[in-house]
């Protein structure tokens, strides 16, 4: 049993390679997943979307502070930037 600096140094030097190997194994596994596994994942994701749509508000509502900010921004904006450009025939 070595408790010197070499044991610690070797572990530190091997850890990046182990991480790369682990990433390669996971990536390979994901490439060859079964069709049933992919369909199950799609069903789970669809259910999550349904739940999120059900719990999300239908329309955003502005409170008084939001309206006050918009009014302030609108008043600070020069009028020529709010007007639509007119077409000139040449």
Image (spheres, rainbow, N blue to C red):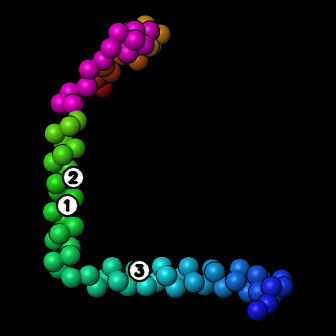
Q: Is residue 72 above or below residue 57?
A: above
Q: Indicate whether residue 62 is drawn in magenta.
A: yes
Q: Is residue 10 above or below residue 57?
A: below
Q: Residue 47 location, x and y as percent?
A: 16, 54
Q: Residue furthest front?
A: 1
**Residue 23 falls left or right of residue 35:** right
The residue wearing badge 2 is 48
Evaluate whether residue 78 shows in this view: no
Q: Residue at 35%, 83% (x, y): give it.
A: 29
In which image quadrant can residue 77 be found? Answer: top left
Relative to the observer, which residue lies in front, 76 or 53? Answer: 53
The residue wearing badge 3 is 26
Mark 1 element type = helix
Q: Residue furthest bottom?
A: 1
Relative to the observer, which residue lies in front, 11 or 2? Answer: 2
The residue wearing badge 1 is 44
Of pointers 3 and 2, the one earlier in the residue sequence = 3
Q: Indicate whether residue 61 is drawn in magenta.
A: yes
Q: Residue at 33%, 79% (x, y): give it.
A: 30
Mark 2 element type = helix
């Amino acid at each position: 049993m070595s408790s010197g600096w070499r044991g610690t140094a070797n572990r530190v030097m091997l850890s990046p390679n182990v991480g790369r190997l682990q990433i390669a194994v996971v990536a390979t596994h994901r490439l060859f997943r079964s069709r049933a596994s992919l369909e199950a994942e799609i069903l789970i994701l669809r259910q999550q979307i349904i739940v999120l749509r059900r719990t999300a508000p239908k329309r955003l509502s502005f409170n008084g502070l939001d309206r006050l900010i918009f009014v302030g921004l609108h008043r600070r904006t020069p009028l020529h930037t709010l007007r639509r450009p007119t077409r000139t025939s040449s």
